[in-house]
Image (cartoon, grey):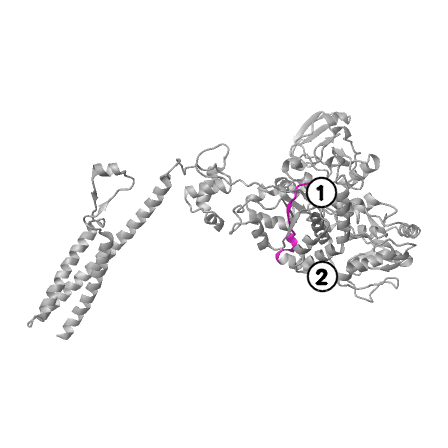
Amino acid sequence: MRLSLRPRSGCLLICLCVSVGTLLLQSLWVPGEESEVTPAGRSPEEQAQRGPVHGSRRGGPGVGRLALRLEALSAQLQRLSQERDAPNTDPQHLHLLVQSLRQDQQGLVQSVEEQLKRISQKIDQLSLHHRLHQEEEPPPGPLESCSVTLDPRYPACSEKVEFLRVRWQLDPCYAFYGVDGTTCSILTYLSQVEDFCPLRLGRNQSVFFSHSPQAEIRTTLSLLHEEIGSSRGPALGFVRSRVEQMSREWIQAGLRMKQSSNNTASPQMKVLLYPGVLAGPAGQRFGSMVERGGPLGELVQWADLSACLTILGHNLTLSTSRDHLHSLIGAAPGGGSCPIQRPLPFDLIYTDYHGLAHLQGAMGLTFQHYQCRFRILDSFGTEPAFNMGSYARSHGYRTLWGSWGLQPLQYMTMFPHTPDNSLMGFAVRQGVRTEGRKHNVAVVYGKQQYMWQVFTPTLVTCLCVHPPPFYLSVPRGSAPSPNVTFHGLLAQDHTVCCTEFYLCFLQVFVGLGFPYEGPAPIEALALGCVFLQPSLTPPNSSSFYRGKPTTREVSSQHPYAEHFVGKPYVWTVDASNLTAVRQAIRDIKLTQVKPFTPREFTCAGMLERLQAYITHQVSQDQYNQWNTHDTQHLKRPPMTSNIWSLLFIVLLFYLTTHEFCLSVLINHIPSGPFSRLGLSCSAREQEVNHLFPAYSPWGRRCGLQAEPLLFSCAGSDPQLRRLCPCRTHLPGQVALSPHGL
């Protein structure tokens, strides 16, 4: 008897559990019979006219049938309990009851499963209907539509909406700005964040007003010392050391500028310095190179730029971390597809090609909006043919460093390679003037031993040769001649003072053909040395310039020193002509020179130049007016089968008219200049060509430039005579016009 009751007891427990669960569902889905429901959106008057609306069983007929089956099952359980309590109960009859109960249990479980599925589907339908209803139903107040309207002022709106409907989940930054896939959220984002669609009704676009005080010349570098004082790493250590060593020169130049009547006030700028080459793993590799003695030219520029801007009264922020950069500019989290969160907090950003790529990845579409605020430290310059991406790709000028589409003047070079770019330069520390004749000793400007094949055989017979201690990677005792003394590699802290000690008492600073266009020869001239360098005949670019955005070919190791300084300070000799080399050394030994520094490479000259840039190179419109032109001064250079390099043009005009050929960012050049030069045009054409405007004697064709970004003074074609407007310049300031200050 006990065995027959055990399965029945288990069934009773199962049924009781199912009953409790069903009753809970019924209590959730079946409200009270007499509960009143007030329809949403009805006024009190409508409710009084229609009367109360009584609730009903929202669970539907399925839930009602389930309740009836539960009542029947409960009745069977009560009868089974009564029979169990009876003294005489037929076992067969009880067995049949248990089977019936099991069948009812299985049917009940299936019914519960079906009802749960229906409930889940009903919930999904209600949720979807509620979301669509929210999109379609305008909020109280002004009528607002979430449909895409055709507005000629926003031609890309509908295309961007369709794009985000499909791809908004590919970058977390869209969700960060509130995009959830709905049309309203997409339109809000595209109107308030990316500005591709018109503003929706009732939405206000934030307008930021800023007032910048006038920048005042500072007489201390304490703010800069605080900014870079905690910086770590060998590269920033070099920058900090150079700033400290030249503080006196910068402060004195600032005082003279403050007292000058030509000082022009400019708004105080918030400036970000971001040398991207020092960020991340690339920065670690660069730092290890600095510890071995080079390259230091770029760090010299960063140090002098930071000191110059501080003296001019601007507020500087220095960053060498990509994470720090993102926090400074307010980059949105994600993959960089979205704009920054707020207006760019910096008026100017000085960076390099590495940093430019980092900024583009962090700013998204805002990169194009703020690109006129970027200034790129580019030691060797970027010619316009490499700068315009589509033109560079189709004409074979594409490199890893070009195709950014900036104004060419935004690229700032170490020397005036091409006037299409701006000269950043650097400042030379003024050395101690020495009295009396210098010794017949030469310091050699060569980093590696293979460079010593140029002048060494002749030099060692005429002079006592000392390699610079911070350049040559040759062990002691391996000198090629007794007249050559190697000093080994000195610590970075002793480099500058040791170099100045040698140059103050030595007579010749010798270049061996490489490295090209570094700051060392100008520093040697400032300390009273003569610079001797080999000429490159014919002019070439060598593998060093391969991959750089320039086609320039140089005629010597340091073209600026050769053409802008010249004798008696700079001697350029054919190294293969031993007679000419010996004669040059004899002439140098008989020549007395005083320390000489071109004005544009003094602290005062750099302050003057940067002040002019900040004042005039602010907006995109001002770029187009930066170099005013005068068609009366157009000149026709001679035809030549050789490369018509900018340096040759500059040299030619400098020696004849004291004017420099400069490109002008204008929309067109009329045909008037051709006739004023005595050129008769049988045909005129306007073309996207970096060699135009130009004149072809064969066929008397006159070509005009169709793309403002391609106005260039670089490049040549033996069949063309190129036209380039010219202007005067300040004495010792090639980059500045008297009318630009």
Does residue 270 belong to the magenta stretch? yes
Q: What is the x, y in percent for residue 132?
A: 35, 43
Q: What is the x, y in percent for residue 555?
A: 80, 45
**CA gap, disc 1 to disc 2?**
33 Å
What residue does disc 2 label? 291
What residue does disc 1 label? 611
Report crowding for label 2: few under 14, some 14 to 19, many 20 or more residues within 10 A (C-alpha). some
Q: Secondary structure beneath disc 1?
A: helix
Figure quadrant of residue 103:
bottom left
Q: Give residue 208's mark.
A: none
- Does 294 sit above or below residue 44? below
> Of residues 96 and 421, which is closer to you in this image?
421
Does residue 67 belong to the magenta stretch? no
- Does 403 sit above or below residue 19? above
Q: What is the x, y in percent for residue 285?
A: 66, 59
Report crowding for label 1: few under 14, some 14 to 19, many 20 or more residues within 10 A (C-alpha). many
- Does 703 sit above or below residue 174? above
> Of residues 680 and 69, which is closer to you in this image?
69
Quarter of the image containing the N terminus?
Answer: bottom left
Left-right relation of 491 to 38: right
Left-right relation of 561 to 665: right
Task: Give me the residue at 87% from left, 63% from top.
Answer: 481
Asked whether residue 517 appears in the rendered view, the answer is no
Q: Where are the magenta residues, as a range?
A: 266-280
Q: How many marks?
A: 2
> Mark 2 belongs to which amino acid?
Glu
Left-right relation of 186 to 385: left
From the viewer's perspective, is the residue at label 1 or at label 2 nearer? 1
> Mark 1 belongs to which amino acid?
Gln
Quarter of the image containing the C terminus?
Answer: top right
